[in-house]
Amino acid sequence: MKCPFCSSLENRVIDSRLSREGDVTRRRRTCAKCERRFTTYERVEEIMPLVVKKDGRREAYDRMKVITGLKKACEKRPVSITTIEEVADRIEQFLQNRGEKEIAGAVIGEEVMRQLYDLDKVAYVRFASVYRSFQDLDAFMQELKELVDGRGNRRVQPPRRRSEPPTRERSRARD
Ligand SMILES: [Zn+2]
């Protein structure tokens, strides 16, 4: 994303919101070089890889689906909607950074788990317990709706990422 004033490619997102229709993300950015602010409008399906479903069908990445999943997992937890949107932003950033045109739905699910693990352990366990048994975003979303909170005292294990982009550093210890 080029700065319209100085053409620098380095900038920081300071605010990010989704259009009412859910297909355009408006981002306020600050240029790292000249420090001026500008706004970008990104159409999600144009910049996100296609999602390959379990049965092999492809569909457009759906931010609302991810947000809904996060909201369900974070129900009655001290997590604001702003935080949830930031998590969705990070997930999208991760998916974009892979630089692939298509991405398995399972990779998205795993990244959601990773983000939730850092955010809120209860939300993570809720999400992970349902997700792991499904491995399919749609079926699992359905199940998540019916999930009651906080039951069981399952051991909380950090999620593992099946593949890591080479540029990214790992700060957490591996198991
Ligand atoms: Zn600039």
Image: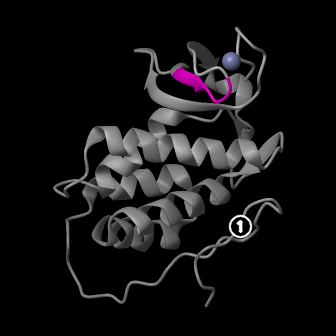
| Residue at 61% in and 73% down | 171
x and y percentages locating residue 122 in the rendered image: 28, 70
Task: Say few, some or many: other residues with alpha carbon within 10 Å of mark 1 (under 14 / 14 to 19 / 20 or more).
Answer: few
Q: Quadrant of the N terminus?
A: top right
Mark 1, ligand 1, within 8 Å: the answer is: no
Majority SS type along the magenta span: strand
Q: Residue at x 33, y 72 (%)?
A: 121
- Which amino acid type is shown beneath numbered disc 1? Glu
Q: Which residue is mark 1?
A: 169
| Residue 118 within the segment the image draws in magenta | no
Q: Position of residue 172 (x, y in %)?
A: 58, 78
Q: Is residue 41 left or right of residue 57?
A: left
Can residue 52 be spotted in the picture? no
Relative depth, front residue between 116 and 8: 8
Which of the 4 image quadrants contains residue 6? top right
For this rendering, which residue is in front, 86 or 3? 3
Residue 35: where, in percent of width, then height? 58, 22
Vertically, is 163 above or below 45?
Answer: below
Q: Taking 90 as reference, is 143 above or below it?
A: below
Secondary structure category for the residue under label 1: loop
Residue segment shown in magenta: 28-33
- In the visual, does 75 lie left or right of 156? left
Q: Residue at x 83, y 39 (%)?
A: 101
